Image (spheres, helix red, strand yellow):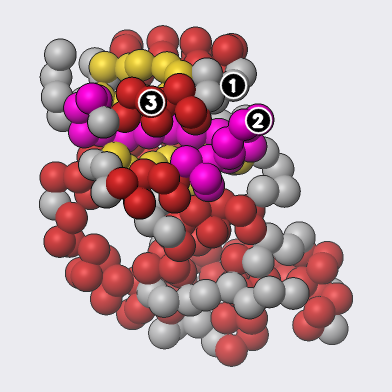
Amino acid sequence: MRRDRCVYIVDDDEAVRDSLSALLEAKAYTARSFASAPDFLDAAASLDPGCVIVDIRMPEMDGLELQQHLVDRALPFQLIVITGHGDVPLAVRAMKAGAVDFIEKPFASETILDSLAAAFSRLAAPGETDAAAVAAQSKLALLSPREREVLEGLLAGLPNKSIAYDLAISPRTVEIHRARVMDKMGARSLSELVRLALSAGVRPSSR
């Protein structure tokens, strides 16, 4: 077993577990699946360090609760959260607590693989986060005040129409600002934008 390529899939959906396992094993990762968060926690102390891909909504214990247990026990795992539509605020909470990424369903194989690359880079060189924060802050400084407001709305998980209502502008104007925010921050996806914003110190306000 390659000790630096261990990925643990925690999801109550058997089809998701099977498809992710097949993808990861085809890419030379060592994949192990768990049907629930308690099952994973029971085994966690004996597992090799690696990355955990966890669904944010599960019975018994959800992804955020699992994350807190891992933090409390100081276990050596990086976390990638899988979310359904509308779970962005929960995913932001997970990333504030140290998750590497959140990925919205349905997701492309490349998205999972890119996130895993980032997770294992963080495991190998945890001290690089300071440099990443400085780079993210320099990008954040490029945003106009209105673009910053749109960014904060996105971090709060609000759809374009809600952001438009709160800012008294049209949804189309929000779309334009959102595109500019993505461009200036150098983000290719909402999850990457959230990661950059949190790294730069932006904290979403409650509505």
In front of the other: 11 or 71? 71
The amino acid beneath tag 1 is Asp
Q: Earlier in the sequence, mark 1 or mark 3?
A: 1
Say what secondary structure mark 1 lies in. Answer: loop
Nearer-the-camera pick, 112 or 126? 126
Question: Dividing the picture into quarters, in which one does residue 53 lie?
Answer: top left
Distance between the alpha carbons at the discs numbered 2 and 3: 16 Å
Q: Where does residue 127 sit, x and y in percent of width and height?
A: 15, 61
What numbered label is drawn on residue 12? 1
Q: Quadrant of residue 15?
A: top right
Can residue 108 be seen by looking at this rendering?
Answer: no
Quadrant of image for the C terminus: bottom right
Badge 1: few (under 14), some or many (20 or more) residues near its Cα, within 10 Å?
Answer: some
Question: Label 2 sits on what residue type?
Answer: Pro
Residue tagged 2: 59
How many numbered circles does the render carry? Answer: 3
Q: Residue at x 70, y 43 (%)?
A: 85
Residue 177 shown left or right of residue 127 in the figure: right
| Tag 1–tag 2 contact (CB < 8 Å) | yes
Locate residue 170 relative to residue 82 in the image: left or right: right
Picture quarter with the N terminus: top left
Task: Say what amino acid the circle numbered 3 marks.
Answer: Asp
The location of residue 194, given as percent across then percent down, is 50, 61
Q: Is residue 126 above or below residue 55?
A: below
The local secondary structure at tag 2 comes to loop
**Span of residues in magenta:** 46-66
> Which residue is labeled 3 in the image?
42
The spot of residue 144 in percent (x, y) is 55, 87
Instruction: Reply above or below: 84 against 25.
Output: below
Q: Earlier in the sequence, mark 2 or mark 3?
A: 3
Find residue 13 and report its horizontal and vertical position in percent: 61, 18
> For the point 21% across and 33% down, which residue is it?
49
